[in-house]
Amino acid sequence: MRFIRNLILLSLVAVVGFYFLERNDVSPEATIESISQTVKEKKQMLESKVVPEREEEVPLEGELFQWFGKSSDDLEQQLGDPNRKDPSAYGYTWWVYTDQSEQYVQFGVQNGEIKTIYATGNQLNMKPVSIGDSYEEIGKEFSFTEEVNYRNGLASYTFKLKEEDQNMRPLVKISDSIFMQLYFDTFTNKLSSVRVLDADTLLKHQPYELQYRGDMPSKPDLSNEEWQKVEEGMEKQIFDITNVMRNQYEKDQLKWEASVGEVAFLHSKDMENNNYFSHSSQDGRGLKERLDAGDVSFTSAGENIAAQYPDAAAAMEGWLNSEGHREALLSDKFTHLGVGVYRLYYTQNFLAKPF
């Protein structure tokens, strides 16, 4: 583009120069020298102009959203050290802030910048929405559509939302390249959690059907050791989010149970390795048999499984919106929880302990 622009400029200057050459009887050598000097000056002016980088801001009132695009240094100065820093499968690291009861917020940090935010719980400054707002109420603030478009130069992307997507996790474009997912509890039609993310992160997650022309952002190629750290982080995230969700529904907190977490992990790994999805293992064992094999004592137990959700938060919202999984998630009879994640297979094992 710069070459073409300079060529056009040179042509215009040449035409004007030769016009004055004919009018004023100036020698061709003098005119060419003048033209060359003019072009040189114009080129220097063009090259010296620096286009300032535009930092896109989130056009929402809530203080929580204003962290998007800010630095992790600012985050740490304002909020202190996070509870944890959990690596993700997408190149950023989750900085987790939670009181493990009322609030849960995680900031996705990559190269020192906040690229995505997920939040659920009470007393979060998220204007113009709040956790617990009705679908109808939030629908007055935002337009929920079947298709959401994004363009980046010549590349174009269209996210296609099925009816289930529109009801449970509508997608809203809030600026040129910033999006918000609004997760709803479809049993109450109230807002359960919110996620803000940039276009690259959304394209890496691919939570909706997608049609596109152009390139897709690449995901990290993780080693087994790196995957293990991601999986361990997601297990802790599921445990924390479970207790914050249970608090919202006035349920008692669950305690972490490492032994049942190992049983859950082995089931997730077995499902991924053998390409199946079921509460029954391929050898015919059910949850009771797997817990007995893991020498786990219990008076009653329940299990939630999920697969191919982009991360722990998305899997949690899926369980909340599935009747059977929801029943286990919010049950009064369970006291302990173990979580096992292998790649993108997720297992929760709930227990009522005999003591």
Image: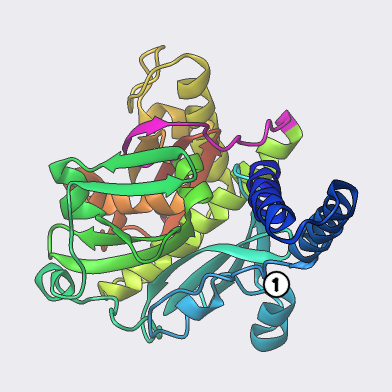
Q: Quadrant of the N terminus?
A: top right
Give the x, y percent position of residue 149.
Answer: 32, 47
Quadrant in which residue 250 is drawn: bottom left
Q: Is residue 208 within the magenta segment?
A: yes
Give the x, y percent position of residue 318.
Answer: 30, 47
Note whether 4 is above or below 102 in the view shown: above
Note whether 162 is above or below 100 in the view shown: above
Q: Secondary structure at mark 1?
A: helix
- Tell me: 110 left or right of 209: right
Along the viewing direction, whichever of 241 and 127 lies nearer the viewer: 127
Residue type indicated by callout 1: Ser
Note whether 34 is above or below 154 in the view shown: below
Residue displayed at 82% across by 56% down = 26
Q: Is residue 279 visible?
A: yes
Query: Which range is magenta?
Result: 206-224
Q: Main secondary structure of the magenta part?
A: loop
